[in-house]
Image: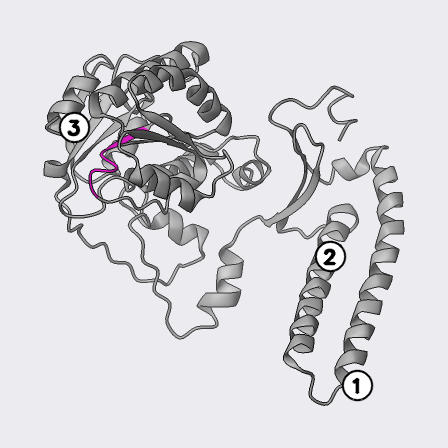
Amino acid sequence: MEDQRDGQPINGYGQQVRVLPSTRTLPVWSEVEVVWDKADGSLRSLLALLGEFQKTISDSLDEPNEDIQDTLSSLASVNRRLAEAELTVNGMVFKPEEMKIYWAELLPNNFRLNLQSAPLHIGPLMEQYLWHEKTCIILTSATLTAHGEFDYLRNRLNADEADELVLGSPFDFEASTLLYLVNDIPEPSDANAYQRGVESAIIRLAKATNGRMLVLFTSYAQLKRTSQNINGALAEADIQVYEQGEGASTNTLLETFREADKAVLLGTRAFWEGVDIPGEALSVLVIAKLPFDVPSDPIIAARSETFDDPFNEYNLPEAILRFRQGFGRLIRTQSDRGVVAILDKRVLTKKYGRQFIESLPTCTVKVASAGELPSAAAKWLNL
């Protein structure tokens, strides 16, 4: 990996390298093969000894007590995990599976090395373990469709024969939700100006609504930068800023936010789904950027290569699904009322932007400037 980055230091995002057939032809790869061949021999010997030890203990005891049974179970788990690791790394180095993605990752600062693999497509696994094994399978979610169609998910899951049904929502989004589309913020391609626009909008909006706000980001780096730059201004207004990744677990962070009088919660990928904070504790949802995946991510890059039109057939539907999941964090009960602010002007300026908006339930929509957002939100929330 040092050879791949020409000896340069690792940047703040770390380093990810896909292991491709071409990677295995590089002269430096022969060193990897030699080292792994030696390590693999030791690992195989260890696995054989563990298996033999486990069998010997089991055979020698007629009725092992509960503690010994627990220990044997733990030992079997360790043996299985080591065997899976051996199989994965051996595939990465010598015998790659055609339908798997392999990559190595160096994390910044601590130089910890992770070796990873993932299925290229999960459809065949769904067939093997679910569709062909069970009499009946029911998938339910508020976000199974992209742009009103099941086609994308059906294709991804190899669910060609599945029946489909769309049920209406019990919520009156037009009466409960103001969808505010900011039309004068710089686009993300103008990184510094866009970042200043996001920070300014969050500060002014939080002050107008007394916090009670969840801000969703697509990158932890932007989340950290935003947190640092809004903290002082919001502290002056007695609004606490909580951010994902500061040590507390997701559940603890959500509980702390829920109980705070005036707070803003900044979250990234994990917070786009599964967050359930009904009532006034969460009244404002801000989506800082449309949730497109990073094209260089090993899984995204590998899967994109299997589509004729990667953007429209894969990247866009994935982003729409996550966008809908993020939107769903706000209205959790029939009595909830709130504001969703989109700080990414591409929903208005790009052809694909309309698909994001059309994927949402019918809300009260307002297209206006960032400057008008605080007063519009406060008026909608009767503040």
Q: Quadrant of the C terminus?
A: top left
Instruction: For marks 1 and 3, give the CA distance.
Output: 72 Å
Instruction: For marks 2 and 1, give the CA distance.
Output: 30 Å
| Residue occupying image coordinates x 28% and y 42% | 328
Q: Given the image, on which type of amino acid does mark 2 rest?
A: Leu
Where 35 sits versus 133, above or below? above
Sort mark 1 into few (<14), some (14-19) or many (20+) by Cα contacts within 10 Å: few
Instruction: For marks 2 and 3, give the CA distance.
Output: 53 Å
In terms of secondary structure, where does tag 2 sit? helix
| Residue occupying image coordinates x 20% and y 38% | 280
Task: Determine contact: label 2, label 1, CB under 8 Å.
Answer: no
Q: Given the image, on which type of amino acid does mark 1 rest?
A: Ser
Q: Which residue is mark 2?
A: 87
Q: Given the image, on which type of amino acid does mark 3 rest?
A: Val
Name the foreground residue: 36 vs 239: 239
Way the structure is coloured: one colour
Q: Which residue is mark 1?
A: 60
Mark found first going from the N terminus, 1 or 3: 1
| Residue occupying image coordinates x 71% and y 53% | 88
Q: Which residue is mark 3?
A: 365
> What residue range appears in magenta?
279-286
| Residue occupying image coordinates x 39% and y 53% | 154
Name the foreground residue: 70 vs 159: 70
Between circles 2 and 1, the one closer to the viewer is 1
| Side (left or right) of 266 relative to 25 | left
